[in-house]
């Protein structure tokens, strides 16, 4: 079972909520799902899933911290990347531990394909928060295919005005499609 509709909102059924890996159990949860370390929280206590705290992202990129648990990364890490990110060989979101990546693939409805469009309205931000530079372009747009890219390391670069993890000039250890499928044979 993927989701059921209730009051025009998609909610996850209990059977769709993945088990939380041991290293992530200290993190806050909402609806049984782990709140990633880079997810911003408003003054009234709401977590803004689908958004990122730019300060934490920058801290994670420079400090080689996992974007989900906030702990130091090992030598190998995984980047969750949209097709357009793969083409540029960089991601504006931090790398993840392999177990955090496996959990994210199961739990994140955008990455695992349960959502095929971005939200059509902007989240309610606090006065001190700013939207991502490409947020307006994504409102209601079709989701891009997602990939898990295993890397041995990355350089921090600036991409479209944000810091990003780049593996340009190196060969990824593995590139696995998550929601992209090869076109059917003609």
Image (cartoon, helix red, strand yellow):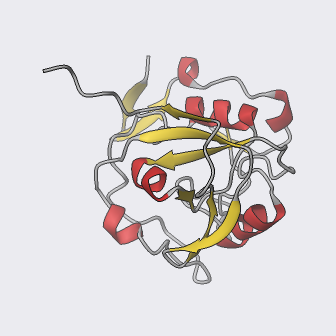
Q: Is residue 31 left or right of residue 161?
A: right
Q: As rendered, which of 127 and 133 lies closer to the eye?
A: 133
Q: Position of residue 155 (x, y in %)?
A: 70, 63
> Does residue 166 sit above or below 186 in this rendering?
below
Q: Is residue 17 left or right of residue 181?
A: right
Residue 32 in sight in this render = no
Q: Residue at x 61, y 42 (%)?
A: 172
Quadrant (top left, top right, bottom left, bottom right) of the N terminus: top left
Q: Position of residue 102 (x, y in %)?
A: 65, 30
Q: Which of the 4 image quadrants contains residue 183?
A: top left
Q: Residue at x 60, y 57 (%)?
A: 169
Q: How many marks?
A: 0
Q: As rendered, which of 176 and 15 lies closer to the eye?
A: 176
Q: Residue at x 76, y 50 (%)?
A: 66
Residue 155 in sight in this render = yes
> Does residue 85 sit above or below 131 in this rendering?
above
Quadrant (top left, top right, bottom left, bottom right) of the C terminus: top left
């Amino acid at each position: 079972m993927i989701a059921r509709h209730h009051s025009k909102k998609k909610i996850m059924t209990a059977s769709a909520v993945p088990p939380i890996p041991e290293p992530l159990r200290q993190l806050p949860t909402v609806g049984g799902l782990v709140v990633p370390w880079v997810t911003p929280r408003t003054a009234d206590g709401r977590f803004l899933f689908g958004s990122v705290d730019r300060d934490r992202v920058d801290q994670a990129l420079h400090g080689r911290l996992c974007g989900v648990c906030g702990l130091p990364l090992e030598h190998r890490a995984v980047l969750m990347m949209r097709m357009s990110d793969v083409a540029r060989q960089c991601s504006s979101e931090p790398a993840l531990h392999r177990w955090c990546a496996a959990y994210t693939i199961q739990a994140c409805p955008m990455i695992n394909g349960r959502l095929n469009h971005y939200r059509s309205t902007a989240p309610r931000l606090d006065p001190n928060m700013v939207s991502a530079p490409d947020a307006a372009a994504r409102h209601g747009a079709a989701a891009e295919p997602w990939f898990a890219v295993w890397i041995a390391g990355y350089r921090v670069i600036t991409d479209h005005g944000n810091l990003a993890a780049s593996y340009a000039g190196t060969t990824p250890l593995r590139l696995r499609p998550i929601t992209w499928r090869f076109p059917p044979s003609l």
